[in-house]
Image (cartoon, rainbow, N blue to C red):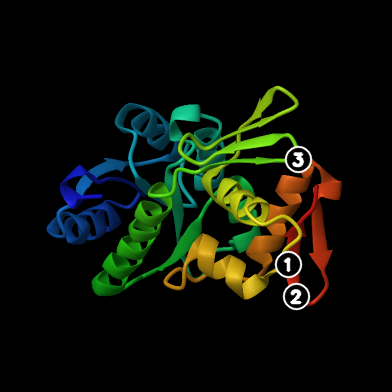
Amino acid sequence: MKKRNTKILLVDDEPDVLEIVGYNLAQEGYQIVTAVNGKDAVEKAKREIPSLIIMDVMMPEMDGMEACEHIRRIPELNNVIITFLTARNEDYSQVAGFDAGADDYITKPIKPKLLVSKVKALLRRLKEQDQSNETLNVGGIEINREEYKIVMDNNEIALPRKEFELFYLLASKPGKVFKREEILDKVWGNDVVVGGRTIDVHIRKLREKIGDDLFKTIKGVGYKFEV
């Protein structure tokens, strides 16, 4: 994924944040598109189809949480990475953010070098995942890695990127117990810092959408997929 072809949508109602963050990412060769609120972000995302969205949580008109939920319902944007940008003193729950469909979060203020490093890590993970295009057929469920599509009982099920990646990982080896550390490494990557609760949130959503009895919790260890 060459930088000049990598578009980042930066969303914040503070002009200084847009200028500073946008400048540092543009210096790395990324194409930067900006939006000043959640409503603007949804429209810009539909028009620009970015690879990554870095979005503030507290904004006028439509906050980041609601904007994220809107974006996740747009098929063309199902694979975009969404990272929340949050102030340290904001009443923000990581779990609520992941429930809304976010992949990660960045706490501001953040040093430019650290920001660039996080962005590179997210996009590197995206590149690695896009290189695997194998289609799985497990228990009558077709999982198309290239199209991020799941077909079950002749019905297509749409999943956000991280839910899909988690499901693909578990379904790739039915019956195998994947340790939590392995899941975090393979789905989120070592360079992305997320809490262990993140896995639980995504498993709960998969159970709701695909079937509660297909996902087994191995207490104190991790999860496995059974058909």
Residue 168 visible (yes or no): yes
Q: Position of residue 48 (x, y in %)?
A: 30, 32
Q: Residues within 10 Å of mark 2 (few under 14, many from 20)?
A: few
* Image vertical order of residue 119 relative to residue 149, above or below: below
Q: Are marks 1 and 2 in contact (CB under 8 Å)?
A: yes
Quadrant housing residue 160: top right
Residue 221 tag number = 2
Residue 93 visible (yes or no): no
How far apart are the two marked residues, 1 and 2, measured between alpha carbons? Answer: 8 Å
Left or right? Give the position of 190 relative to 156: left
Q: Residues within 10 Å of mark 1 (few under 14, many from 20)?
A: some
Residue 139 tag number = 3
Instruction: Please identify, in this view, whether the residue under mark 1 or under mark 2 is nearer the observer.
Output: 1
Q: Are marks 3 and 2 in contact (CB under 8 Å)?
A: no
**Mark 3 / mark 1, whichever is N-terminal:** 3
Residue kind at label 3, given as amino acid type: Gly
* Circle 1 residue: 177
How far apart are the two marked residues, 3 and 1, measured between alpha carbons? Answer: 17 Å
Q: What secondary structure is found at the residue carrying circle 1?
A: loop
Q: Position of residue 57 (x, y in %)?
A: 49, 52
